[in-house]
Amino acid sequence: MDKINRERRSKNMSAIKSKNTKPELIIRKYLFSKGIRYKVNYKIPGQPDIVFPKQRIAVFIHGCFWHQHTCVDGHIPRSNLDYWEMKLRRNVARDETNILKLKKQGWKTLVLWECNINTDFIKEALKIIKLMKNEKSIIAANKRKNEMNVQQSF
Ligand SMILES: [Zn+2]
């Protein structure tokens, strides 16, 4: 490979990478602006993009192509069909396995898709906020119940 090709290739690669990370940054920024704090790079199956450890909520933000959304972007390329089919099917299978593992460990999972975020990111972010607030109030209610039980046992 000559130098120009190599440079162009690395430029393409970084363009692809930044395109893939953008939707999750939009969502993270919005949550942060609403005072909602979350974890990234949290070491649980599938490395979800946004994690609320206390509420045990894991949010995945999926690129429609790589994770095969049922939208127009989730198509398999016609050239190299066998290669792409195998690769993308493996991605989908891995996603399913990770979500199963998380559910077994008591996590609630939410998958958001890039195309929906591009259309209306606030709507998608609100799905997270709603789920998170629900879990928060359940945790608080359980805590109150436990405290009451403690008081009653005296
Ligand atoms: Zn999509």
Image: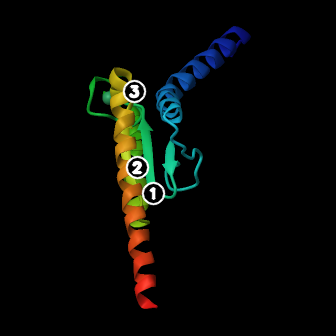
The N terminus: image quadrant: top right
The local secondary structure at tag 2 comes to helix
Q: Please state the horizontal and vertical placement of residue 102, each as a whole percent of the image.
A: 43, 59
Q: Real-space Cα distance between discs 1 and 3? A: 43 Å
Q: Which residue is mark 3?
A: 80
Q: Please state the horizontal and vertical placement of residue 22, each as a whole percent of the image.
A: 51, 25
Instruction: Identify which amino acid the numbered label 3 is placed on.
Output: Asn
Some atom of ligand 1 lies within 8 Å of the CB belonging to the residue at label 1:
no
Relative depth, front residue between 73 and 107? 107
The quarter of the picture showing ligand 1:
top left
**Camera sees residue 77:** no
Q: Which residue is mark 2?
A: 132
Instruction: Identify which amino acid the numbered label 1 is placed on.
Output: Gln
**Camera sees residue 58:** yes
* 3 or 2: mark nearer the eye: 2
The local secondary structure at tag 1 comes to loop
Q: State the mark number for residue 69.
A: none
Question: Few, some or many C-alpha atoms within 10 Å of disc 1 (few <14, some 14-19, many ≥20)?
Answer: some
Residue drawn 52% across and 31% down?
33
Q: Which residue is mark 1?
A: 55
The local secondary structure at tag 3 comes to loop
Left or right of 57 in this view: 124: left
Instruction: Identify which amino acid the numbered label 2 is placed on.
Output: Met
State which tag comes first along the sequence, 2 or 1. 1
Question: Few, some or many C-alpha atoms within 10 Å of disc 2 (few <14, some 14-19, many ≥20)?
Answer: many
Where residue 67 sits, quadrant-wise, is top left
